[in-house]
Amino acid sequence: MIEFHSVSKKYSADATALRDVSLNIDKGELVYLAGPSGAGKSTLMKMVAAIERPSSGRVIVFGQDIGKIRKAGIPFLRRNLGLIFQHQRLLNDRNILANTMLPLLVTGAPKAQAEQRARAALDKVGLLERARAHPLELSGGEQQRVAIARAIVNRPQIILADEPTANLDRVAADKVLDALRAFHSVGVTCLISTHDEQVLDGAARVIRLEHGQLVSSGASGTPPSGEFSIDAGGAA
Amino acid sequence: MSPWIRQHRFALGAALSTVRKAPGSFLFNVLVVAVALALPFAGITLLDNVRPMSEQLSVDPEVSLFVKPEATREEAQALGPQLRQIIDDSKASITFIPREQALEDLKARSGLSAALDTLGDNPLPDSYVMKLAGSASAADASRIDAVVEQLHQLPHVDTVQVDSAWVKRLAALLGVLRLALLLLAVTLGVVVIAVVFNTIRLQVLTQRDEIAVSKLLGATDNFIHRPFYYTGALLGLCAGAVALGGVALALQPLNAAIAEFARLYASEFQLAPLNAAETAGLLAISAGLGLTGAMLSVQRHLARLR
């Protein structure tokens, strides 16, 4: 579903975000992307969402080469992705129901249908009763759950969560991760980046990046293998 | 409802929502654009009123021929058939005005009856008034010049006066005014586009977060651009309506002053507002200018945001 073939990304001569990264993520996998700040996690996720294009190598998502995808085709690719950001990026001038409806409205869905599905998504993350609240009235954890509701409302095939538990306390972080795991359990492919080692406990597959290089891939606790290519299924 | 209609309805709703959020700002922009539009609209209204008057006058120019005072009535009347022969136009009318009738007419029109009575003898000559058909084209004008030349050659003819000369001057003046108005309209059209361009630029900057999020959620460029296009067109349309309303309101006091002036010339000339088709046309042009400003602004500033 997601393939990286010898991918490098340079922002300038002195700033290389990714170096020769190769990996595969299969349909239905829950994969954590770990590494310190500046390791290249966000750049890797941006490439999956076609926000960035590789400087060299190939990134394939849903069979489409991100390096060659036409600009007009990018919105249609993103409609199959659920994006969750560290700083939620909710729109503060409208309530959380309207925020959650947005991914459906941009696709031209009828308003009534969008509202119905947004309510269902908010119900799944336990925030339906706060549908009329505005983002700034919610806690950080609640805002992140709204972001999850917005990400899953269009029933995406892949969820990309970039540091979804950063800035959250442990209780709130657990709720957010539980919600993401729940969507993975129904077959959604999840790629979650984090620098919080506690999040990785018991993870079936963790991809570690350091200085833009892939240093390991496997179950949490697997020592760095130095391999750059990961087989389908996530075995290191 | 088709997705296409639904998306346009959504965009219009988003544009109206933007207006509702900052009505004062929108109103101010409408007034600025309306002021820019009002001047050419007023000029168009004025020309639209004056044009039919000038066309009416230029269609039937008058040539007055004055017979020499010493000519007898028989000699004067003998000119009639010769005039018909020279003019050679079945549509033209030739009227003989005896000097006695001319004096009576002068008394009636000028209100100087008592003063004219003191003259004793009638100083006015016998005359002919010829209404010729058409003088709009250069060919017509040269034909009239040729007729006048031939009339001068006839015996007992004292003076030949072409009354349409001032109409030609008026038509030429209107031509210059029309050109000046066109240049003014183009200049102010650019001003309108610039105002809308800047208004939309500010909106793009204000909504940059929403734009960025929408793009990440799968919004196409058209989806993002459309509300701004509607806002620009709406701004132009409202400004056009305000400008037309302002011009129509201004006609009332102006007509009061014109009526006073026109009475001195025994005329009932009044400025009328533009008809429905012309009004709709100007509103469409106003909306088009707003849309153009919005399109230019969106293309430029969204490209910068990217």
Image (cartoon, coloured by chain):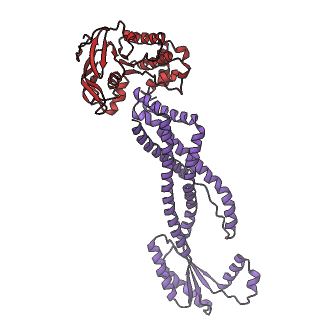
* Residue A205 x %, y %: 31, 11
Location of the C terminus of chain A (image quadrant)? top left
Q: Decide: is B167 above or below B183.
A: below
* Residue A56 x %, y %: 24, 29
The residue depicted at 45 percent of the width and 72 percent of the height is: B138
The residue depicted at 56 percent of the width and 46 percent of the height is: B239
Location of the N terminus of chain A (image quadrant)? top left
Chain ID, purple in image: B
> Where, by quadrant of the figure, is residue A231 drawn?
top left
The residue depicted at 62 percent of the width and 59 percent of the height is: B271
> Where, by quadrant of the figure, is residue B220 drawn?
top left
* Residue B294 x %, y %: 46, 43
Between residues A210 and A132, which one lies in front from this camera angle?
A210
Between residues A25 and B290, which one lies in front from this camera angle?
A25
Between residues A163 and B263, which one lies in front from this camera angle?
A163
Chain ID, red in image: A
* Residue A137 x %, y %: 56, 20
Q: Is residue A119 visible?
A: no
